[in-house]
Amino acid sequence: MAYSLALALVVVGPLLGPGYLLLRDGVSTPRSYATDAALGLGDAAPRAVPQDGLLAALSVVVDGGIVVKAILVLALAAAGWGAARLAHSLLRVSLAPQLVAATVAIWNPYVAERLLQGHWSLLAGYAALPWTVVLGQRLRSGAGQAHPATRTSHGDMASGPDDAGSTTAGADADRGPRTDTSEQAPGGRARPGWARTAVPWAMLGGVLAAAGLTPTGSLLAGLLAILTVGRRNVVGAVALWLVSAGPWLVATALSGSGAEPSDPTGVAAFAARAEPGLGTLGSLAGLGGIWNGDAVPGSRTTLFAVLSTLVLLAIVLSGVRAVAAPGERCTRYSRRMLLVLAAICILLPALGATGWGLSIGESLIERVPGAGLLRDTQKYVALAMPAYALCAAAGCRALASFRRRGVPEFARQPAPQTDTVHTDAPADSATAPTSPTAGSEPSRGDGTTLRPNTLAVQPLIAALCIAAIILTLPDLAWGVGGALRPVHYPPAWQRVAAVVDGPGDVAVLPAGMFRVFPYSGRIPVLDPAPRMLRSDVLQTGVLPVRGRVVAGEGARAQRVENLLLRGADPADLAAQGVGWILVEHRTPGAVGDARTTLSRLQPVYSDADLTLYRVPGAKESAKASTVSRTIALTAHILWSALLLAGLVSALIRYRRR
């Protein structure tokens, strides 16, 4: 955990200073509010649900900027820690290969590109993926089936976050047996079966809830959970996923936004993109290829990207054979499933970027409600990360074993047989300790035993692998080359936020959803107004992407914007439920004949940055009903309870150990 946290801090360090995240799609504000849009009940699709609801709740007591920074750091650290635990659980590797797995999970183009795009909450779903497999494997193997007194820290079939006091757990293989008391009641009695299974189920629910900060993260983790837990546990996994996805599923059902067919233009606009010298398939295989060519580290815009990709793939491919090997029967399915899934989630986005793939995607989005969630296909490359981390760890161990082939034969004699239980044997195989298991640290699976000097080689190999990964993507360090930095809002935002409190929604000028403020830099950023004000801000959802314009779902917002640009009478805006007009200065954008409308209104606040107008007589007909808000809030509460239950269960299990 300490190593992963250190890497995370190296990546996001500059952002941790005073200020707020304001980079492309990433927006944090001092205070957010539980508006209809934040609950997913507005005109636009609930893409930021329950993320916005969580920020609205937490920013009451903690500054919203601090909340976002904390989630981002914890997400990256958890991704590395989870990858290390995954390697330990499925391969029984020691500390050095675990660190390689953690590095692959944190230091890769996918993380860099999603950070530059501002997708901080998607990275929470990304971080949940290895933990989902760890806990799913634990449930698949039958949590707590063996009596605690017969289990060791490495006999546990798939230890979860609670077993991972630190990444040094993988080095315990050489320290002899250790009794696991996590499943014992006070006095040394075995806990009842329901108590042994309740904790991993609760922890899986918490992981799914953390992934469910966004719909995409929810889909990623939910798919992995269903594929991993085993047939007898699928119903339970689906039930947990439904609760974790409840906020955005309920919002979609209540508002209808996002449940309608989307603009097919978005398929080509958001298709995976080829990076220099790699082609689309090579870019995706290297965990890159985001649709936005501007949200890419500088090193990925030149032929240096080829070297970076070759290094990553070489490290990963060196361990594929070991991961695919029969090995332990209890982990065989999960290891091979991750390999197949990685291949699929790389090949499908690559095929989706071809001519006929785009045609199929456009047809799908035009005909299937909600299919617009799949248009950014490169997002789903995240599903390759667990397999990549696993293979990198296996490759590190394999390279260390290969390094010993030059050692004289007498130094590689079989270890003497003993009657003690092998500390790396599965819990249900303790009766056959002399049977070698592929993936066990001390055994190579060929009848010989890795001597201590072989284990001593692993740190050197791991250091070389880690250095190669980091040095071939150098600009991920320190805020992705300095792009990830805090922004300071002018005081006008807080003053306007204090004034806006009354009936009616907020219309904004200039037209469009993106801004280029002097204080945010030259990169277009999402308008912070919807997350800054306590009234709903109307947004059309129209996205200018790669020379195309993708239509949004905000039909009422589009009508209001057209009225403003035509210079309509304020009464016409009031009839659409508009109670405020906010003009954001010092940013480019169309205003049309809006000055005609504004000339008939009196400003209630004005300075060089913002001007706020009150529109009298606004109708409230556009507001969500009390019943809809109650149902949406209930879904958010259940999601929060699932998240808290997972955290509490992890803490309880950790304390028992």
Image: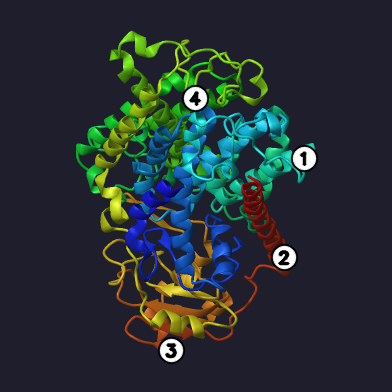
Above or below, comparing residue 285 to residue 263 in the picture? above
Q: Position of residue 489 (x, y in %)?
A: 37, 75
Q: Residues under labels 1 and 4: Cα distance?
A: 37 Å
Label located before the other in sequence (4 or 3): 4
Distance from disc 1 to disc 2, alpha carbons, whole Å, reads 39 Å
Query: Residue visible at 37% across and 64% down?
Result: 16
Q: Residues within 10 Å of mark 3 (few under 14, many from 20)?
A: some
Q: Residues within 10 Å of mark 2 (few under 14, many from 20)?
A: few
Label 4 sits on residue:
340
Q: Which residue is mark 2?
A: 630
In front of the other: label 3 or label 1?
Answer: 1
Residue under numbered circle 1: 191
Secondary element type, mark 3:
strand
Q: Is residue 176 above or below residue 332?
A: below
**x and y, in percent, of residue 6 in the image:** 38, 51
Q: CA distance from mark 3 to mark 1?
A: 68 Å
SS assignment at label 4? helix
Dot 4, how many residues are within 10 Å of its Cα: few (below 14), some (14-19), or many (20+)? some
Snapshot quadrant of residue 143: top right
Distance (Cα) linking label 4 and label 3 = 60 Å
Tell me the CA gap for discs 2 and 4. 42 Å
Question: Badge 3 is on which residue?
Answer: 603
> Mark 3 or 1 closer to N-term?
1
Say which residue appears at 57% left-offset and 20% top-offset: 328
> Do the numbered discs 2 and 4 sit on residues whose CB atoms are within 8 Å?
no
Location of residue 373 in the rendering, given as x and y in whole percent from the top left corner? 52, 46
